[in-house]
Amino acid sequence: MQMNLQAKIPVTFGILTTENIEQALQRAGLKAGNEGSSTAQSLLEMIALNE
């Protein structure tokens, strides 16, 4: 957070917490949505706020 505040460099962190490969595949774009795209969308929104 300090980097974002001081240098205006947005930083996000996204990690899938799963118990098995099936859950990972589901959360990476199949039935459960795409968690990675949510993280990317958050980063884009932070970039827009810094402009």
Image: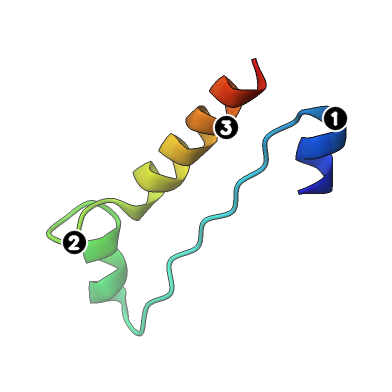
Q: Residue at x 83, y 46 (%)?
A: 2
In the rendered structure, which disc, 2 or 3, sits on the residue that comes first in sequence? 2
Residue 43 in the image: x percent, y percent? 53, 36
Mark sitting earlier along the chain (3/1): 1
Colour setup of the view? rainbow
Q: Where is mark 3, residue-wise?
A: 46
Distance Cα–Cα, label 2 vs label 3: 25 Å
Q: Nearer the viewer, residue 28 or 10?
A: 10
Mark closest to the chain's N terminus, 1 or 2: 1
Left or right of 29: which side holds 51?
right
The vertical placement of 46 against 50, above or below, is below
Residue that protrudes farthest toward the right in the picture = 6
Q: Nearer the viewer, mark 1 or mark 2?
A: 1
Q: Amino acid at mark 3?
A: Met
Q: Which residue is mark 2?
A: 32
Residue type, numbered disc 1: Ala
**Label 1 residue SS:** helix
Tell me what residue is drawn at x 45 percent, y 46 percent: 39
Disc 2 is placed on an element classified as loop
Provide the residue designation for mark 1: 7
Q: Residue at x 76, y 49 (%)?
A: 1
Q: In screen coordinates, is 31 left or right of 48?
A: left
Residue 45, image x and y in percent?
49, 30
User: In the picture shown, does residue 40 fall above or below 19?
Assistant: above
Tag 1 near tag 2, CB within 8 Å: no
| Three-letter amino acid code of the residue under disc 2 | Ala
Quadrant hosting residue 33: bottom left
In terms of depth relative to the viewer, which is nearer, 24 or 11?
Answer: 11
Looking at the image, do the residues carrying marks 2 and 3 touch, with CB atoms under 8 Å apart? no
Q: Position of residue 24 (x, y in %)?
A: 31, 68
> Total number of numbered labels?
3
